[in-house]
Amino acid sequence: MTRARAIRLAGLLVLGMPLGAQTYDLVIRNGRVVDPESGLDAVRNVGIRGSRIAALSPAPLSGGAVIDASGLVVAPGFIDLHSHGQDLENYRYKAMDGVTTALELEVGVGDVDAWYAERSGGAPIHFGASAGHIPARMAVMHDPGRFLPTGAAAHRAASEEEITDLKRRLEQGLKRGALGVGFGIGYTPAASRWEILEMFRVAARFHAPCFVHVRMTGEDSIQAVEEVIAAAAITGAPLHIVHITSMGLGSTPKLLQMIAEARARNLDVTTELYPYTAAMTELESALFDPGWEEKLGIGYGQLQWVATGERLTAETFARYRQAGGPVIMHMIPPEAVEAAMASPLTMIASDGLIQQGKGHPRGSGSFARVLGHYVRETHTLTLMDAIRKMSLMPAQRLEAYAPAMRNKGRIRVGADADLTIFDPQRVSDRSTYEEPARYSTGIEYVLVNGALVVRGGQLVPDAMPGRPVRAVVR
């Protein structure tokens, strides 16, 4: 049944059947429905049949099961475009943070078919990935790094033959339904600007978006953003610049201005941030090659070793860099986060990864933090704007290339029943830099494909309704 065949009767939108015949698998009753696509912000009853939203009504609905959402907000499920944690541990943190779709689009993956096959048994939430320039470069150059390059893929320019191989690998990934092309140029500083441009050309042939961690930070981020905006303009590839605040630092407002100006000239450029003043990466990566203090504007004392929580010294930096592992960098000015959060250009994306309970609080608390801190406490955002940044805007970033996203990030008849129901007075992140493995609070119900994965603020054991999000397989 298409939306065009839906009829409206007594304020109830139904799918072509008499009102009296409507019984839904699940009814969400008396919740404050906030839908950024239509602008709806009102108490409604939501009827769900199977995996889709089948009714929105101010009048009562009848269902096989009922959620009383009185006093709660019913929002489209949150979509995280930048989630490195792609396993059950991380999917559970996401679900408890209101996320119904988590995608690995910055680093991406090498073998797209194998990556999706590993998750064929399902997951609590939806998942997907890009074809990654980093893993392709690591494979071509036989780099010994585990997640990020530490050898030739970071430090050596590619030959023409290697660039041809990289292009072939990315093209193969896009043919197998990857959601775009991922870049971590800051981790592959030896990659020439011509190499990056060639990778953008591959994406452009497929009309696939490029998700880019730019080459440099701070004041140098201006020319780094110029590089990728130019690549987008030259090739026509859509561009998404990841974590704008941890790249721009104090120059974040300038980067936002550049993106706004590019968009005003009809370039397809978007960006994101996470709601924290610290970043996290691997200490063995090229980001900490000699000269890192000047580039990042920090010293040893602003580095926090994830495994122990300790702040580093010159001695521990050298020792832990040799061993390798995640480190938190306390380097993002609060005013940069505030400026980016308030900007209508930005989406929310976590850049999250938690491993055996260790990591950064953004991996478990990003979305609840936006609602609790930036909506309720500081009033930086309205509730509608926050939900737009966390649901509709990420869906719109992908929907031209991945048709499945056209029915996510919205609350309307026919849309996927991916919904997050939260208490606006209680929702909050509980995770900290020392204890990141804490579930958010105030997220009362989360539905994925119409099935509950969070009920009454608790995970539903063994609920695995999540499905792969994939572009067209050619």
Image (spheres, rainbow, N blue to C red):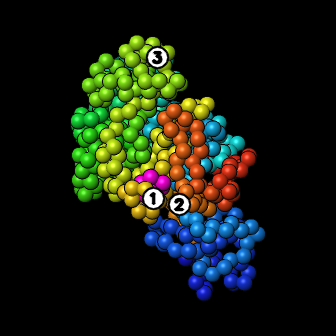
> Circle 1 is placed at which residue position?
376
- Between the C-alphas of marks 3 and 1, the distance is 39 Å
Residue lying at 41% horizontally and 62% vertically, measured from the top left: 382
- Between the C-alphas of marks 2 and 3, the distance is 42 Å
Residue 219, horizontal then vertical, whole percent: 23, 36
- Between the C-alphas of marks 1 and 2, the distance is 7 Å
As drawn, the label of residue 420 is none
Residue lying at 52% horizontally and 51% vertically, measured from the top left: 428
The label nearer to you, 3 versus 1, is: 1
Type of amino acid under label 2: Gln
Image quadrant of residue 314?
top left
> Circle 3 is placed at which residue position?
320
> Circle 2 is placed at which residue position?
425
Point out the stretch of residues depicted in magenta.
Answer: 371-375
Q: Are marks 1 and 2 in contact (CB under 8 Å)?
A: yes
Q: Is residue 287 above or below residue 464?
A: above
Type of amino acid under label 3: Tyr
Image quadrant of residue 59?
bottom right
45 relative position to 379: left or right: right
